Image (spheres, rainbow, N blue to C red):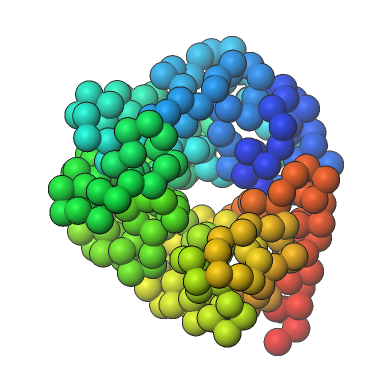
Amino acid sequence: MRIGINSTEYMRKSALQLFKDIHDTGFDSVNLSFESITEADYEPECFFGFPEVTDERTIDSVLRAKEKYGIRVSALKGLFNTAHPDPEVRDEGIRRFKSLCLAAKIFDTPVITVCSGTRNTQNFMGFSQDNITKEAWETMSDTMKRLADIAERTGITLALEMHLSHIVNTSESARRLLDEIGSKRFKMVYSSADLFLPGSAKQENVRHLLGRAFELFRSDIALVYAGDIMEGDGIEYCGTGDGIVDFVYIARMLRKIGYEGDVMVEKVCGEKKILDAYNHWKASLGISEMF
């Protein structure tokens, strides 16, 4: 398993500096968001998490950086509001996604991460009470089918991120969507910190929630996020190894199901904690090999 990191854990910087910092910490790969590099000159919008067009200057800067530092761009962030009530917003997201697929091909990147979105029309990472409606699910599912069709044609794998504020926010709803889409190109991000709902972040629930996701996803896991969460009644993310997530258990389960992909450190709570997160996951891998 390669050890990588989500690029959004860093402050925005040039592609060369970003990839140097990733390399110097010891990471092998990155899940790249274009908001992380200055060359892209992109600020996330209320509907979209990636730019309209990936320009030649941005592509060249990433190619130079990955070649110089030997960092694999294992995934690209392709999040947008797939459940937005306005079809023009969804169509624009799909159009942008096609451009992102071209960039993925240039970078030799096999995976693009997507999300199930929300009926919140102001912030695609925000919650809406309407997320639980049949209409919201059907809108989102239709968008996902269109994205899966593009993925089939381009040879890209989609990996669904679960988010607490989104329509798909449990392992069970994620499994339902995977079955509904029914594409070999539509897979899951196993995101340890996002498996907890408010009230469930208790030590006694950890193994059950982590194990249940493995039971439901198994060979459909295309990417892993190693994030942590504090024990409590709410949701408070924390540096990898500072909370209740059992990373040795995750490492053992990944070996058990034969996972050979990337594990991306995330939600580390600041650049100063990135090295600690890397060391904790690497140590967890080592311990898992002893049993």
Residue at (72, 25) in percent of width and height: 13
Residue plotted at (64% across, 71% down)? 231
Image quadrant occupied by the N terminus: bottom right
- Vertical relation: 168 (above or below) 157: below
The number of numbered badges drawn on the structure is 0
Residue 135 vs residue 101: left or right?
left
Q: Is residue 174 visible?
A: yes
Q: Quadrant of the C terminus?
A: bottom right
Q: Foreground residue, 266 or 205? A: 205
On the question of residue 253 being in view, the answer is no
Q: List x then y, in percent, for residue 95.
A: 30, 24
Q: Residue 189 vs residue 239: left or right? A: left
Quadrant assignment, res 15: top right
Closest to the observer, 189 or 67: 189
Q: Is residue 208 above or below residue 43?
A: below
List x then y, in percent, for residue 234: 55, 64
Residue 166: percent from left, percent from top: 37, 50
Q: Residue at coordinates 51% horizontally, 55% vertically from top-left? A: 223
Residue at position x 29%, y 59% in the image: 178
Can you give x and y, in whole percent of width and height, for residue 33 in the image?
56, 34
Decide if residue 254 is on the left or right side of residue 183. right
